[in-house]
Each structure stands twice: as structure tokens, then as C-alpha cells.
Image (cartoon, rainbow, N blue to C red):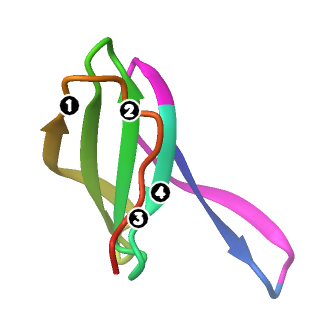
Amino acid sequence: VNVYQFNRVNNTVSRVAFISLGVQLRKIVWSPDGNYLAIGVFTGPGLLPIYKFDRSNNSLTFVASISATNNIRDVAWSP
């Protein structure tokens, strides 16, 4: 998973964070406040890890994971 930042002044894009999950991804969704990523992964039974994005040092930190008995096909945050 790569997180990129767009610089509107210079019209450039640069990678600011990266994590390797080693599995097939289904869906990646930012939380409404832009602080968390929910990542639906395909591992047989579904897995939904949640990562916090720290903008001060451009890092992703694992905070929680939810297991599902079935494959995860979609992910959405509730406001």
C-alpha cells in the first residue's frame, strides 16, 4: 500500500508512506477525517486491518484488525 501526496504548487506527486501486506487487496478507504485507512484484504476468510496515518512524520501505524467469516468485497466508513 502506497500513500502519495500531491503538491499543488509544483504539480508533483511523491510517495510519503508505504506498507507491505503481502496479500491481495480488495478495497482501501480513507476515514472521513483522513486519519485512518481501512484495507479489505483477500485471505480466504476476510481480514480488515485499520491503519492510522500520521501526517507529521508520514507513517502508517497498525491500530486494529477485524476478521470476517466471508470474503470482504467492499469497505465503507460510517460518518
Corner quadrant of residue 8: bottom right
Tell me whether the residue at label 2 lies in contact with that at label 1, contact meaning CB atoms closer than 8 angstroms.
yes
The range drawn in magenta is: 10-25
Q: Which mark is residue 68?
A: 1
Measured in 3D between alpha carbons, the distance from the residue under mark 4 to the one under mark 2, in whole angstroms, is: 13 Å
> What's under tag 2, amino acid-wise?
Ile
Residue 44 falls inside the magenta stretch: no
Kindly identify the residue that appears in the image at 25 percent across and 51 percent down. 50
Q: Residues within 10 Å of mark 4 (few under 14, many from 20)?
A: some
Q: Which residue was labeled with disc 2?
A: 72
Q: Nearer the viewer, mark 1 or mark 3?
A: 1
Q: Which residue was labeled with disc 3?
A: 58
Measured in 3D between alpha carbons, the distance from the residue under mark 3 to the one under mark 2, in whole angstroms, is: 27 Å
* Residue found at the far bottom of this picture: 9
Does label 3 or label 2 sit earlier along the sequence? 3
> What's under tag 4, amino acid-wise?
Val
Kindly identify the residue that appears in the image at 39 percent across and 18 percent down. 22
Q: Residues within 10 Å of mark 3 (few under 14, many from 20)?
A: some
Q: Position of residue 40 (x, y in %)?
A: 39, 38
Q: Is residue 49 left or right of residue 1?
A: left
Q: Which mark is residue 78?
A: none
Q: Which mark is residue 29?
A: 4
Q: Residues within 10 Å of mark 2 (few under 14, many from 20)?
A: many
SS type, badge 2? loop
Q: Position of residue 36 (x, y in %)?
A: 33, 65
Tell me whether the residue at label 4 lies in contact with that at label 2, contact meaning CB atoms closer than 8 angstroms.
no
